[in-house]
């Protein structure tokens, strides 16, 4: 998978940056700056790149949807979020 510079999530531009973490971390999400950081190691493995991106996008979507701010987490709320927001993003952005 090629290096990404930006993606759209729920209609918002999300900046993609690459870095190397000393602890071997693969990704991070900063919803406030609308930035996802991926490890340079992801560029060597298409499956790792895609799965890490999807993981970080889910964090971004949970933040954007308000799920991450709930005092009492509900399994049903997470399932509905994934069902209606995350899965459509995955299908629209899956590499061909």
Image (tube, helix red, strand yellow):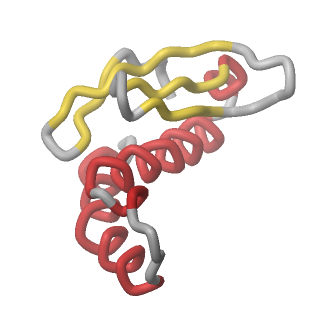
Q: Is residue 23 above or below residue 74?
A: above
Picture quarter containing residue 45?
top right
* Residue occupying image coordinates x 61% and y 43%: 47
The single residue placed furthest to the front in the displayed view is 71
* Residue occupying image coordinates x 33% and y 64%: 87
Q: Is residue 62 above or below residue 35?
A: below
Q: Between residue 69 and residue 53, name the one nearer to us.
A: 69
Left of 29 or right of it: where is 31? left
The single residue placed furthest to the left in the displayed view is 11
Q: Residue 61's x, y, as percent? A: 34, 51
The single residue placed furthest to the bottom in the displayed view is 76
Picture quarter containing residue 15?
top left
Count the marks: how many?
Answer: 0
The single residue placed furthest to the right in the displayed view is 23
Q: Residue 21's x, y, as percent? A: 76, 19
Q: Between residue 58 and residue 44, name the one nearer to us.
A: 58
Q: Between residue 21 and residue 92, name the one nearer to us.
A: 21
Which quadrant is the C terminus positioned in?
top left
* Residue occupying image coordinates x 50% and y 34%: 29
Q: Is residue 4 above or below residue 1?
A: above
Q: Residue 33's x, y, as percent? A: 36, 22
């Amino acid at each position: 998978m090629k290096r990404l510079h930006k993606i759209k999530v729920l209609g918002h531009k999300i900046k993609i940056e690459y870095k190397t973490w000393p602890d071997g971390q693969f990704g991070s999400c900063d919803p406030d700056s609308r930035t996802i950081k991926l490890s340079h190691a992801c560029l060597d493995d298409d499956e790792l790149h895609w799965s890490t991106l999807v993981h970080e996008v889910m964090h971004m979507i949970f933040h954007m949807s308000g799920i991450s701010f709930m005092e009492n987490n509900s399994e049903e709320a997470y399932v509905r979020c994934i069902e209606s927001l995350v899965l459509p993003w995955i299908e629209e952005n899956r590499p061909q």
